[in-house]
Image (spheres, helix red, strand yellow):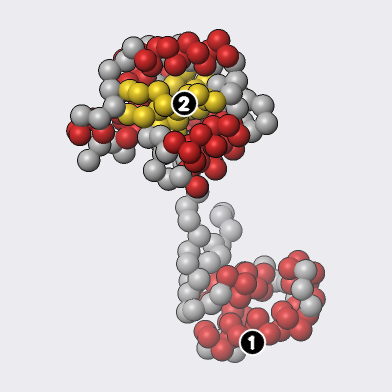
Amino acid sequence: MTQEAEGKPARVVVADDQTVVREGIVMLLGLLPGIEVVGAAGDGEEAVALVAGLAPDVVLMDLRMPRCDGVEATRRIRAEHPGTQVVVLTTFADDELLFPALAAGARGCLTKDAGGDEIVRAVHSVLSGDAGLSPGVQRRLLERLAEAGPAPAAPPAPPDGLTARETEVLLLIAEGLSNPEIARRLHVSTATVKTHINNLFTKTGLKDRAQAVRYAYGKGLVRPPAG
């Protein structure tokens, strides 16, 4: 059950290295319904320490701070205090640190010109398990995904109980590499390569390298060249 459902205010820590900005956000939050500011930090290190001591529900986290920036602070908070959500604060929706912060575990993002209603929605969204992204950030996220194009297909899982290394050796055999060439590519000894080959032959029932090549293509581990 969320704090909103229980009638309890969301306990919030504000982290921003600019005193005027930090105090302004704290003052604004103090006027908003359903939010209680329990602490304010001037950098990422202090934010992590406050979370450890206060266990807030949400941290409003500036991205660009000395000693420990918002990305690293977010990563540490989400790893060490998973009960605390993070909404990052950024001056611009295209801040280059935005996407690393989301990858580090931030559940929401607001630009610093967000209004009170937008902040309340973001805080309660992340507490209910949703993403709290401002419209500008959502547009930039969609643009970034469009620029990246479709995600590459996941490689097929190794068949017949092959380990990742045995599969790697199999693919290099399919490329036509000799044992010494495979050894140089993988930075191992030729004897180690032979051991991997013996193991993969035993697991797959293969007898020679020609069969190994056909097997790799047959299992979809290697695709025939186009054209």
- Work out whether 193 lies above or below 118: below
The residues bearing labels 2 and 1 have C-alpha atoms spaced at a distance of 62 Å
Q: Dot 2 surroundings within 10 Å: few (below 14), some, or many (20 or more)?
A: some
Q: Residue at x 50, y 24 (%)?
A: 40
Q: Is residue 8 above or below residue 176?
A: above
- Count of numbered labels shown in the rendering: 2
Rendering coords of residue 147 (x, y %):
52, 31
In this rendered view, identify the residue nearer to me: 99 or 143. 99
- Front-most of residues 149 and 49: 49
Tell me if mark 1 has few (under 14), some (14-19) or many (20+) residues whose alpha carbon lies within 10 angstroms of its own.
some
> Which mark is on residue 198?
1
Circle 2: element type:
strand
The residue drawn where x is 76% and y is 66% is: 185
Q: Which mark is residue 39?
A: 2
Judge left or right: residue 50 versus residue 135.
Answer: right
Residue 219 appears in view: yes
Q: Earlier in the sequence, mark 2 or mark 1?
A: 2
Image side of residue 204 versus residue 171, left or right: left
Whether residue 108 can be seen here? no
Quadrant where the C terminus is found in the figure: bottom right
Instruction: Tell me residue 136's x, y (percent).
Output: 43, 18
Q: Nearer the viewer, residue 58 or 150?
A: 58
Kind of residue at badge 1? Asn
- Quarter of the image with the N terminus is top left
